Amino acid sequence: MTTATEHRYVITDDQILGGEPIIRGTRTPVRAIVELWRQGINAEEIESHLPHLTLAQVFDALSFYSDHTPEINAFIQANRVADDLINDS
């Protein structure tokens, strides 16, 4: 079931990523945008890393994150790759 949020471009869909907040019309989770932003990539530049998104979608995702920080941080932590699984070749 798709559920709208108070943010225009962010929805949840039980069939996509287990209901994790995503950008409407995509399978891109809000956490993906937040993680790029946390790496120091400006919001205006995230569009070039995820070219299927608009700048409005990026800003809305960051706004959603601001309103739902603990929830998105939990998704980030749950999807984190363990350091021992990262190969330094």
Image (spheres, rainbow, N blue to C red):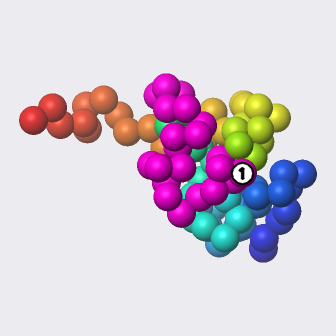
From the top left corner, tell me how far across and down residue 7 is, in percent: 84, 51
* Residue 19 relative to residue 2: left or right: left
Q: Do we see residue 36 in this rendering?
A: yes
What residue lies at 78% left-to-right and 70% top-to-bottom?
Answer: 2
The verdict on residue 54 being magenta is: yes
- In this rendered view, identify the residue nearer to me: 72 or 50: 50
What residue lies at 83% left-to-right and 57% top-to-bottom?
Answer: 8
- In this rendered view, identify the residue nearer to me: 54 or 77: 54
- In this rendered view, identify the residue nearer to me: 63 or 73: 63
What residue lies at 26% left-to-right and 38% top-to-bottom?
Answer: 85
Vertical arrangement, residue 58 with respect to residue 76, above or below: below
Vertical arrangement, residue 37 with respect to residue 19, above or below: above
What residue lies at 72% left-to-right and 31% top-to-bottom?
Answer: 70
* Residue 4 relative to residue 88: left or right: right
From the top left corner, tell me how far across and down residue 78 is, in percent: 53, 40
Q: Do we see residue 20 in this rendering?
A: no
Disc 1 target residue:
56
Vertical arrangement, residue 33 with respect to residue 67, above or below: below
